Image (cartoon, rainbow, N blue to C red):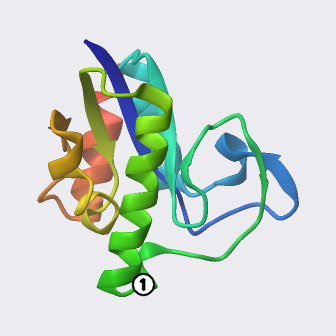
């Protein structure tokens, strides 16, 4: 079974055009990405409020969007778009997804994706960061 890690985007971003992995600069995002890489998955993607499922090597520009400011319908529409992108990448293959993001980024994805691990679920942000730093291999 292939393993995919989905990492949150971040509010803190560099200006200009950058590979997505380098655009986001917040410490929480960095900790999520380091933890994701330490898991040695088959793939890592970023969950972007603007771009949906985002390849970390794709060059993008600064933007100011977050699911935290979107209503339920907009978040459902975003999740539907992400699920379509996931199907486009992986088809119906059996996958294991680890999601490193807040609930608004996974709330409408979990049921459809099926085999999902949420290691940060139920932890406050400080405990999430502590978990990531302590468990990065």
Closest to the observer, 7 or 13: 7
The vertical placement of 15 against 45, above or below, is below
The vertical placement of 72 against 91, above or below, is below
Numbered-mark total: 1
Measured as percent of width and height from the top left, residue 70 is found at 42, 84
Name the residue: 71% across, 71% down: 63
Measured as percent of width and height from the top left, residue 55 is found at 61, 38
Q: Secondary structure at mark 1?
A: loop
Name the residue: 47% across, 23% down: 43
Q: Residues within 10 Å of mark 1 (few under 14, many from 20)?
A: some
Closest to the observer, 38 or 2: 2
Measured as percent of width and height from the top left, residue 100 is found at 33, 46
The vertical placement of 64 against 45, above or below, is below
- Image quarter in which the N terminus is found: top left
- Answer left or right for 89 relative to 100: right
- Answer left or right for 44 relative to 14: left
- Answer left or right for 97 relative to 114: right
Residue extending farthest to the right is 16
Residue 61 visible in the picture: yes
Name the residue: 36% across, 87% down: 71
Closest to the observer, 86 or 117: 86
Closest to the observer, 137 or 72: 72
- Image quarter in which the C terminus is found: top left
Residue 120 visible in the picture: no
Write down the residue under mark 1. Answer: 70
Name the residue: 40% across, 71% down: 77
The image quarter containing residue 25 is bottom right
Measured as percent of width and height from the top left, residue 116 is found at 18, 38
The image quarter containing residue 127 is bottom left
């Amino acid at each position: 079974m292939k393993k995919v890690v989905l990492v949150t985007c971040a509010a803190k971003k560099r200006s200009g055009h950058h590979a997505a992995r380098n655009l986001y600069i917040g410490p929480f995002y960095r900790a999520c990405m380091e933890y994701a890489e330490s898991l040695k998955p088959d793939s890592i993607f970023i969950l972007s409020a603007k771009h949906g499922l985002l390849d970390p090597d794709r060059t993008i520009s600064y933007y100011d969007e977050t699911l935290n400011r979107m209503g339920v319908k907009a978040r459902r529409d975003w999740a539907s778009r992400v699920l379509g992108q996931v199907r486009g990448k992986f088809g119906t293959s059996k996958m294991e997804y680890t999601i490193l993001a807040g609930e608004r980024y996974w709330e409408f994805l979990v049921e459809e994706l099926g085999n999902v691990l949420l290691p940060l679920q139920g932890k406050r942000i400080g405990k999430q960061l502590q978990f990531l730093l302590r468990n990065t291999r």
